[in-house]
Amino acid sequence: MKRDILLHMRSMSKHYPGVQALDSVDFDLFAGEIHALVGENGAGKSTLTKILAGAEQSDSGTIEVSGRTIAIREPADARRLGIGIIYQEFKLVPELSVAENIFLGDERRFLRHGFVRFSLMHAEASKVLSRLGETIDPVLPVRKLSVSQRQIVEIAKALSNHVRILAMDEPTASLTDREVENLFAVMRNLKTDGVGIIYISHRIEEIFRIADRITVLRDGKLIHSCPVAEADSEMLVKWMVGREADREAHQWSPKGIAPSQRREILRIENLTSDRVHGISFGLDRGEILGLAGLTGSGRTELVRLIFGAERRSSGRIVVDGREVSVRSPGDAIKAGIGLLTEDRNLDGLVLQMSILENITLSSLSDVAFGPFVNGSKERRAASELVRRLRIKTRSVETPVETLSGGNRQKVVLGRWLMTQCNILIFDEPTAGIDIAVKREIHALIRGLASEGRGIIVISSELPELLQLCDRIAVLCDGIVAGILTREEATQERLMKLATSYA
Amino acid sequence: MKNLYQSFGIGFALLVEIAIFSALSPHFFTTDNLLNVMLQISITAIVAVGMTFVILTAGIDLSVGSLMAFVGVVATSMLKLDLRLEYAFPLAMLAGLLLGAASGLIAGTLVTRFRITPFIVTLALMTIWRGLAFVYTEGRPVWELPEAFALLGNGRTLGIPNPTIVMIVVFVTAYVVLSHTRFGRYIYAIGGNPEAARLAGIGVKRIVTQVYVVCGVLSAASGILLASRMNSGQPNAGIMYELDVIAAVVVGGTSLFGGRGTVTGTFLGSLLIGVLRNGLNLLNVGSYVQQVVVGVVILLAVLLDQWKKR
Ligand SMILES: Nc1ncnc2c1ncn2[C@@H]1O[C@H](COP(=O)(O)OP(=O)(O)OP(=O)(O)O)[C@@H](O)[C@H]1O
Ligand SMILES: [Mg+2]
């Protein structure tokens, strides 16, 4: 099969203050090919796609599309050339509807006598969404969607146009298995239509399933490029991090805490709101409890209720045997409960503040003397976490908005590691985090548990839960469909429970 | 040129301004005149500090000018109570400052608990305080005040005008609060991303309310100084001050969207506008033309700020 070179980016370089994000990288893409772009957090993957999208300008290098050298100065240029982008950090407008977001900047398609025909737009939006196997109401404002639904809208937006080149920057970071399957089916269809796809993901197994070729970046440099058949996951990790990775992160013996200390630290009784109904469970010191379920099953809602981020209509929260009144996140933190939320940009980080300020935001009282923040103490604590989490940055003063997606995630994680909370809830803790650091974060979470804290983890990746948790509670339609122990849990049984009422 | 501007920002613009006026007028760069400029900006600059706090939380306070007048007439009228001055004086000051705090508390509560936008809340308070100032005085200024009161705003300590000393103390304190305390850090966090701040455990409503109280108290202090400068309580004092104050804050680089800005910027912004007015006066530029020039300079300063960010 002879294939045409669709896209050729030659010696692309991009410098940001303090970092060479791209250092003369060559990248090409054939029609009808899925080309995976992999690398550690901050390796330069998103930067390459942003340049292709016209959202950033390269310092040097040329871009050829179908053999013609072209200039992409702004996103409209890219759109005209048939280039579609799914951004890692969402670019949706929260107040606009799903349909309006999908067709943002492209409303002219629906003009009749100078007015936008919304009925047409909604019908068209539903059509695009159904290609992805989704039934999100196109009239809803994006603000009301879950993170994975927002991701779907972001994908739909890229597909709404007739694209020849599609760059997908971590489209699956917050999707559940079923949604990933639907997405892959769509990608295979596009492929047969001759679309070239650039696919960025930290989920290694996905890459081996879907990609034809792999290109590895490290510190902005091209390290290796080869057909997927010539690589395996160990080699891939080695190329990414530049050294042999520890084969399996520290062996984990479940409940590594003495039985005498295994008292219950948290008990939820009958927790109820609009979307979850009568949820009860307990959590022991030293235990890691997983929450599984499909999108919309109420996992995020449940943990937000426990944390006081949303109002519950009834139910009790018992910490260390005493009922606590949790009316706000502040109350929750005082009771020793911390929550890492699922969308770092929306409600996790204050983007214009520095890494340092974001890390210490919830524990300022620990580094303060009365009302005064002790600058050197604060800096020491934050620097320690930056080192431990390997946040790629020149200094702790760097504004978080200039960090890559994965490094942003590490900053929020750092904030909760710094608090003295004995109950830590992580909603998608490793979304967008590279494989090497992911192993470290798993080890870290286990470490927190063995210190005697109680941990709750939500993950849309079942293998992650199976690897990490002592027990896994499965939610379905806002109800606990079942709780499985580590020994009982398998991917099939979890899936079965997750769809038990559907 | 761009690099130079980027490192010094508004300070650079200020230097250019000073250089121009020094060249054009022999009376400009003298100790007396510079102290005079400082005195002239003191009253608005003190309020601008409070306004900086409010704007950092992505709010706005339009009530400051009216509040100054209301506090002014209430405090001066208390000086005329049949009491010995040792008692009446502190009592009047205290009442004025409490009034300012109460105004801030009302604004903050309406903004945070009743979720009315700051613009509307303080617009309403602006007309309410102005109206009450007239109602309270029946439209007549409060005259014939004890001599000691005039000293507060017109006297000097160690050769420096008293309002300027108050201004310096307020700026230094505000600087420390914003950059070295938890309260200050929370203000930036709330302005930058209120939902993230709430989920980090910050009592957003409490902090925002406190910020309006700070602005109210500083406006009250300014209102008292203004009354003392005029040696009377004028119900129509401070009309349109809110706009001068907001201009100083914005020229100083604080973002109206919240989360970005410093009091150092606000100080330089106040100075930039103050020096401009003073210089134009020395050059005998008429007040109508002055208004135009000040407006143009405000636009230029904000444009330069945009350019700097690029
Ligand atoms: N606007 C910016 N200003 C300064 N530095 C930036 C900016 N955007 C990106 N960078 C830096 O460029 C480097 C590459 O970032 P990029 O977002 O391309 O990484 P990535 O490979 O997509 O990582 P991740 O897997 O975490 O998403 C990082 O060191 C990042 O901090
Ligand atoms: Mg990225």
Image (tube, coloured by chain):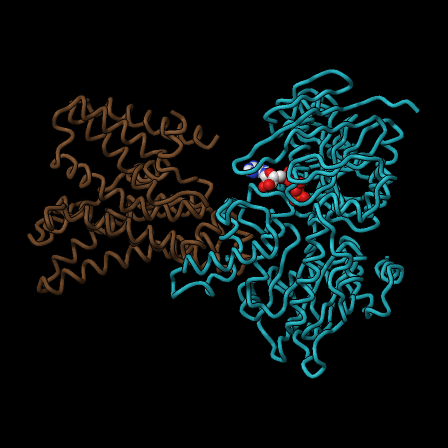
Chain colours: A cyan, B brown
> Which one is nearer the viewer's eye here, A350 or A262?
A262
Residue A181 placement (x, y as % from top left): 85, 45
The total number of labels drawn is: 0
Residue extending furthest toward the front: A243
Q: Is residue B10 above or below residue B261?
A: above
> Which one is nearer the viewer's eye here, A308 or A237?
A237
* Residue A135 picture quarter: top right
Q: Quadrant of the C terminus of chain A?
A: bottom right
* Residue B84 picture quarter: bottom left
Question: In the image, is A40 to the left or to the right of A393?
Answer: right
* Residue A196 picture quarter: top right
Can the viewer see residue A163? no
Question: In the image, is B122 to the left or to the right of A4?
Answer: left
Q: Is residue A259 above or below residue B66?
A: below
Residue extending furthest toward the bottom: A260
Question: Measuring 32% from the left and 31% from the top, which residue is drawn there?
Answer: B12
Q: Is residue B264 above or below residue B277?
A: below
Residue B39 placement (x, y as % from top left): 18, 41
Residue extending furthest toward the left: B147
Q: Quadrant of the N terminus of chain A?
A: top right
Residue extending furthest toward the top: A68
Question: Measuring 57% from the left and 32% from the top, which residue is drawn there?
Answer: A15
Residue A484 placement (x, y as % from top left): 82, 69
Residue A138 placement (x, y as % from top left): 74, 39
> Which one is nearer the viewer's eye here, B105 or A119?
B105
